Image: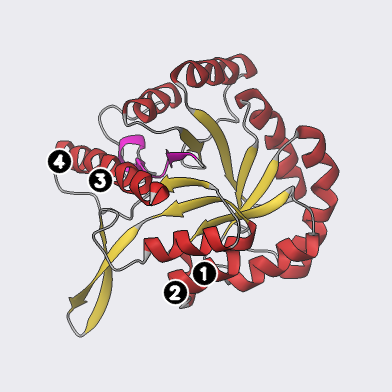
Amino acid sequence: MKIGIGSYTLRWAVGTPDWRPARPLTPEGLVDQAAALGAEVLQFLENLPLDGLSRDARRRLAAQAATLGVQLELGIRGCRAEHVRRHLPVAADLEAALLRVVLEDERGAPTVDEAVATLRGLLPDLRAAGVTLAIENHSSLRPAEIARIIAAVGDPAVAACLDALNSIERLVGPLETAAALAPYAVSAHFKDVRVVRHGASWRLAACPLGEGVVDCAGIMAALRAAGRAPNLLAESWMDRLEDEAATLAQEEAWTRQGIAYLRRLAAA
């Protein structure tokens, strides 16, 4: 069990399609920043794709990470077979044994049966590459449906990336999500929120890990009860502030606090 971050943890430092800082983090800069923050694992996700880099550049990135003691993992959006196969050499160049996948892409999400058929067809490729494909629960399918997919594939090369808060959009709470996916989890994303009044309604407001209403200890308990010891990644849904320097400073502070919190949680 390693503690770390993903490229979405530092989404504002990396930049988004709608906003970029004066000096966006490069892949090399993100590896350096992860090490400086004390992260032991770093997931490169689709907000900082690496398939456009040359093989030599990706191998240099892997060497940089190894020197700094940071384990690299890869993440993509979309599970179409050709898309997954195209990224397996990228994972190999990074020496990444985990490929986190969000099932839906810009063309939509597969059905449960479609996902099972696709993933079964990918098993020989995953085994040959020595890569575990970890499905992250998102907005298209409920956690129980993702658990059905993994169980139906029935191979350790296909597992779960548990994000206990993501499925709130489907009105599935963090502990219910953890109960469904903990038995299959090889990676876990943690973030926290407060529930605040917003006019006549309520909204979820991001906060540092350990300061909100998410039962992170309960999620850890579910993982342990299932006999799982996945890598734990600190994330947040932090909104951008008006000032760039303040945004980046708060994002870094929350990330440091999140890593420290997960380290205490893992040691408890």
Q: Quadrant of residue 96?
A: top right
The magenta segment is 2-14
User: Which of the marked residues, 1 or 4, is nearer the chain's N terminus?
Assistant: 1
Q: Residues within 10 Å of mark 2 (few under 14, many from 20)?
A: some
Q: CA distance from mark 3 to mark 2?
A: 23 Å
Residue visible at 34% across and 52% down in the picture? 236
In this picture the colour scheme is: secondary structure
Q: Is residue 118 magenta?
A: no
Residue underneath mark 4: 246
The type of residue carrying mark 3 is Trp
Which residue sits at x=36%, y=36%? Answer: 14
Is residue 141 among the parts visible in the rendering?
no
Using the image, determine if residue 67 lies above or below residue 106: above
| Kind of residue sitting beneath label 2 | Gly
**Above or below — where is 202 with respect to 67?**
below
Q: Disc 1 marks which amino acid? A: Thr
Q: CA distance from mark 2 to mark 1?
A: 6 Å
The residue tagged 1 is 177
Q: Dot 3 corresponds to which residue?
A: 254
Labelled pair 3, 2 in contact (Cβ < 8 Å): no
Q: Residues within 10 Å of mark 1 (few under 14, many from 20)?
A: many
| Marks 2 and 1 in Cβ contact (< 8 Å) | yes
